Image (cartoon, rainbow, N blue to C red):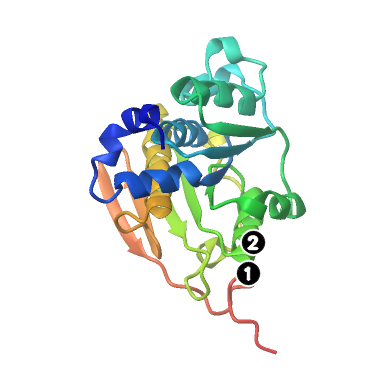
Amino acid sequence: MDDQQLLRFARQILLLDVGIEGQQRLLDAHVLIVGLGGLGSPVVLYLAASGVGRLTLVDHDRVELTNLQRQIAHGSDDIGTPKVESASTAAHRLNPECRITCIQERVDGQHLNELLDDVDLVVDACDNFDTRFAINQACVGRGIPLVSGAAVRWEGQVTVFSGKAGEGCYRCLFPEDGEDDTRCSTLGVASPLVGVIGSLQAMEAMKVLTGAGEPLFNRLLAYDGLTAAWRSIKLRADPHCPVCGRQDN
């Protein structure tokens, strides 16, 4: 870590749970972020600002006017630009030293496995179940921690899956045959809500990478913006889960 980095991250290094060692872990880390919309925007900005050394950004979409109400990594001048590019530009404004790879496509299971070759953590900030299930399966297969978030209307949730055997996964929480009918494009979403949930995802990613505090392993943190109420729900691994459960013959 050079003098400029020590100065840039000084306030974070002062944290006893981070220090020089924890900050170096962030600088050495590689995080894959899938989805650069409402949730992914604060995730990419805060992880770049906090000093994560490498970010791989995945999103097939381009910036539209309707995105700008909540997707703070993009601006009016970015309309028509791939979201991975505008998000990368915004992140580099905060931390030019962050190495960013942009992948403008909708990734499937096979490509996800390839992308995870040297990734330390994955952040799921997408908006559809098919991609979430594919991300989960790939992370379980590699034993890679997964930070998952969702937000719609006035409500959001965050949880973290360790990738370790016996600790459960996204499929333990949601069945794969569920209908994908909860997108904000049809139900709406409060602008600051995705900032709250996305920022929490960035916080959980930072905790996992540095070893600070207690990440949301085996817990779901739910937030109701209308009542300002938080709930912490304990999660249990499903022994019959087709992804992480024991497959006895």
Question: Which quadrant holds residue 11?
Answer: top left
| Mark 1: amino acid | Val
Residue at 29% over, 33% down: 10
Instruction: Say few, some or many: other residues with alpha carbon within 10 Å of mark 2 (under 14 / 14 to 19 / 20 or more).
Output: many
Residues marked 1 and 2 touching at CB (< 8 Å): yes
Q: Which residue is mark 1?
A: 243
Residue 72 appears anywhere in the view: yes
Residue 133 vs residue 107: left or right? left
Which of the 4 quarters of the picture holds residue 35?
A: top right
Q: Is residue 15 left or right of residue 129?
A: left
| Horizontal and vertical percent position of residue 32 | 58, 44
Q: Secondary structure at mark 2?
A: helix
Q: Position of residue 222 (x, y in %)?
A: 36, 51
- What is the C-alpha distance between the residues marked 1 and 2? 6 Å
- The amino acid type, in three-letter code, at marker 2 is Gln
Relative to the observer, which residue lies in front, 123 or 233?
A: 123
Q: In the image, residue 99 lies at what x, y percent?
A: 57, 33
Q: Is residue 226 visible?
A: no
Q: Which residue is mark 2?
A: 137
Secondary structure beneath disc 1? Answer: loop
Label for residue 109? none
In front of the other: 150 or 211:
211
